[in-house]
Structures are given as structure tokens and as C-alpha cells.
Amino acid sequence: QVQLVESGGELVQAGGSLRLSCAASNVAFSRYTMGWFRQAPGLEREFVAAIRYNGYTYYRDSVKGRFTISRDSAKNTVYLQMNGLNPEDTAVYYCAADRGVILSSIRNPNSYDHWGQGTQVTVSS
């Protein structure tokens, strides 16, 4: 069974940085598309970033230039480096994985079968 465990979320001031990690187990990591999503209270889960098996990356517009997704296949871990955080980035951040994500659906949370438990990111103003 695929397991995803996120870490790195915490309270940070506006303008600060955080790096989230997602450790994957029981998965052929190098063949999977890995994604980060977030969900704020009362809102739907939304796409943040994704990285495909070939290293290509994708971002939602509001985080481009501030967030960077990367993967370390030796450690079966995907990272989300977040810089220039603002209060609108406050949410629970989820790691997701799937082997069969097609490019046109990479931003759709329904395209991912495996999810972590989430890590809270809170940005104070």
C-alpha cells in the first residue's frame, strides 16, 4: 500500500519561507507523478504544484516564482520549497501521488489515488 507522509508545516510570518517534504513508501517512486495540493477552511482542495516522472514541473499561477517543487528519487521524497509566503497561502498542504496522471488532468485532485495526511501551513500577517 502506498504511503505518503508530509512534514515541514508550521507557523511563519509573511515573507518567510518553508520547505515541505513528502516521503513515499511502497511505491515505484520514479514512475509516479507527485503533486502538492492545499485546502483552506471552507474552500475546495486546490492544485499547487506537480512534478512528473520526467522532472517536468507545473504550478498554479499564484505560486509561480515563489514555490519550487522537486524530487529526490534516492530518498523517495518530494519537496515543496515555499518562499515569499503570504497569508493567502495558509492551508493544509497535501502530498498526492499517482502513476497514471495524464497531463491535461495534472491539476485535478481526482487524478490522484494516493494522499498523505496533510501538514498545516499558517502564515501570519
Image (tube, grey):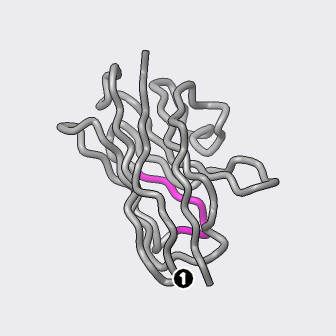
Q: Which residues are magenta?
A: 57-63
> Which one is in front, 106 or 25?
25
Seen in the picture, residue 75 relative to 41 is either above or below; the reply is above
Q: Position of residue 34 (x, y in %)?
A: 44, 39
59 vs 78, left or right, is right
Q: Is residue 81 magenta?
A: no
Determine the residue positioned at 54% across, 44% down.
Answer: 118
Seen in the picture, residue 47 relative to 114 is either above or below; the reply is below
Q: Position of residue 61 (x, y in %)?
A: 60, 66
> Which one is in front, 95 or 5?
5
Determine the residue positioned at 35% across, 32% down.
Answer: 24
Determine the residue positioned at 79% across, 53% down.
Answer: 43
Residue 16 placement: quadrant: bottom left
Which amino acid does the dot numbered 1 rest on? Ala
59 vs 5, left or right, is right
**Residue receiving disc 1:** 14
Determine the residue positioned at 67% across, 52% down.
Answer: 39
Q: Is residue 58 magenta?
A: yes
Q: Position of residue 65 (x, y in %)?
A: 46, 74
Q: Position of residue 56 (x, y in %)?
A: 38, 49
- The quadrant in which the N terminus is found is top left
